[in-house]
Amino acid sequence: METKKWDIDCVIYDCDGVLFDSFEQNRMLYNYIAQSQGRAPLTDEEAHYCHAHTVYESIHYVFKDTSDKEEGAVAFWKSSINFMDFIVYLKMEPHLTETLAALKERGVKLAISTNRTTTMKHIMEAFGLNKWFDMVVTALDVENPKPHPESVEKILDVMKMDRERVLYVGDSEVDRGTARAAGVKFIAYKNQGLEADGAIDEHLDLLRFLADG
């Protein structure tokens, strides 16, 4: 089947699972928080939930059966965690920077829409990503985190983008819902089971969807 070709002015990326293989890093972080409150390690289902949601949503979910410990878990997260201890376990996805460079060379604007919060600034600095991205929107920058479309709408508004010429790359149902609600095209990354306008298993494959010129 011939690959669709689109005129694209802006590509918006999710962070976890797209820019980085961060599943085990997130599991380690939330297991550490759970341990601080005497809770058992996360189940696989809980780890997958935490991978796609904000830290507040994740802590609330992890402690849903022991709500009296939720406040202590939030306080522990805010006061006792050195995020750099966990960022070192992130693994940048293969060929990411090559793809970002190719998109920039075509004049495509780049943005990030993520449900991460305070850690995103440290990640951008640690991996030298600031030079590539024109805008980063975290859950701290909006009232409604993904899958609400507010983060994407904010990017469209600030960057003056036509949603018909914007592409969102994500790996989860949360990302798919965000893109659909915002009315932008959606490419599924390493998740062939997601309903999407296209799917890729490595970053350079994204270039196949862009019209020449």
Image (cartoon, rainbow, N blue to C red):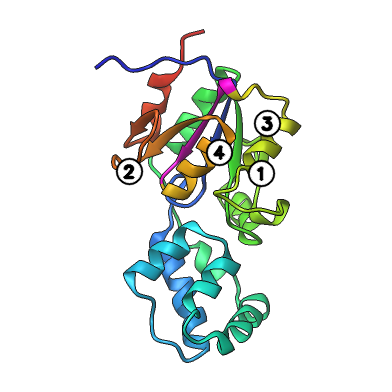
At 68% from the left and 31% from the top, the residue drawn is: 156
In the rendered image, residue 195, in percent from the top left (x then y), is placed at 36, 37
N-terminal label among 1 and 3 = 1
Q: Residue 60 lies in magenta, yes or no?
A: no
Residue under label 1 = 150
Q: Is residue 209 left or right of residue 122?
A: left
**Which secondary structure, mark 1?**
helix
Which residue is the extreme one toward the left? 1
Q: Nearer the viewer, residue 202 or 65?
A: 65
Circles 1 and 3, Cβ within 8 Å, touching? The answer is no
N-terminal label among 4 and 3 = 3
Q: Nearer the viewer, residue 64 or 90?
A: 64
Residue under label 4 = 181
User: Can residue 49 be spotted in the picture?
Assistant: yes
N-terminal label among 2 and 3 = 3
Q: Give the position of the N terminus as an image quadrant.
A: top left
Q: Nearer the viewer, mark 2 or mark 1?
A: 1
Q: Residue 170 lies in magenta, yes or no?
A: yes
Circle 4 crowding by C-alpha within 10 Å: few under 14, some 14–19, many from 20: some
